[in-house]
Amino acid sequence: MRTPVAEEPTPSASHRHNGGDPMTAVSRWLSRASYDPATTLALWAAGETAPLLVGREWRLVRIDFTPATAAVTGLRARGRHIGPYLMGGAEHAMWWLLPLGEDGGGVAGIPGVTPYPKGSELFAPPPGKYLGDRVWVLPDLADGRWSTLTAAADLREALEAARAAGTP
């Protein structure tokens, strides 16, 4: 099950029609997961990280860097969509946004994967900026699927395949 957000314009359409930054629609979409989207947007505009709430717009899993990079490779090889995720350098981890209602797709229990409970906070930089040793990795903004999350079942399949291939 994919969770597109139809009411938000694609960044490319937003950019063409109002001359704005293509990251504006992405920022607005991500900020909906916060306590107060206006405050989140203001923090991001000031170059600060802002807390996003797990369970408001998506579920969240933290994946250790090695299995996460193997999963990206596997998803690409299978032609699966890769939705937005947050990458942290010093933490050697990636945080994947998964659709609500998919019960984490069974990724809980896979070594190197930590589901975050509903109500947890994820401190995130603004899209397009490296901040707090984290950066968003976004799908191609021009293809119109930038707000479509990675299917949890696809992520589980890629993680299991990587583990079967010997990825720790």
Image (cartoon, rainbow, N blue to C red):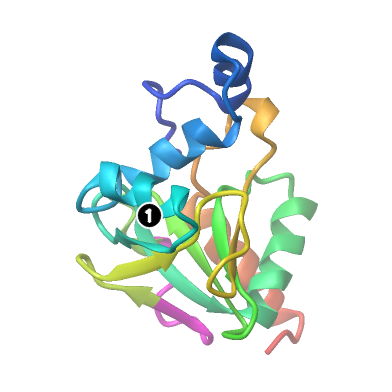
Image location (x, y in percent) of residue 37 = 28, 44
Q: Residue at x 57, y 47 (%)?
A: 83
Q: Residue at x 67, y 27 (%)?
A: 143
Quadrant into which the N terminus falls: top left
Q: Is residue 13 visible?
A: yes
Give the main secondary structure, helix, strand or loop, of the magenta stretch. loop
Q: Quadrant of residue 66?
A: bottom right
Can you name the residue that lies furthest to the front here? 46
Q: Residue at x 55, y 58 (%)?
A: 85
Up-down: is 48 above or below 116? above
110 in magenta: yes
**Nearest the eye: 61 or 41:** 41
| Callout 1 amino acid | Leu
Pointer 1 residue: 43
Residue 136 horizontal side relative to residue 30, left or right = right
**Nearest the eye: 130 or 168:** 130
| Badge 1 element | helix
Which residue range is magenta in the image? 105-114
Q: Residue at x 50, y 38 (%)?
A: 26
| Residue density around tag 1, few if under 14, some if 14–19, many if 20 or more, within 10 Å | some
Up-down: is 92 above or below 20? below
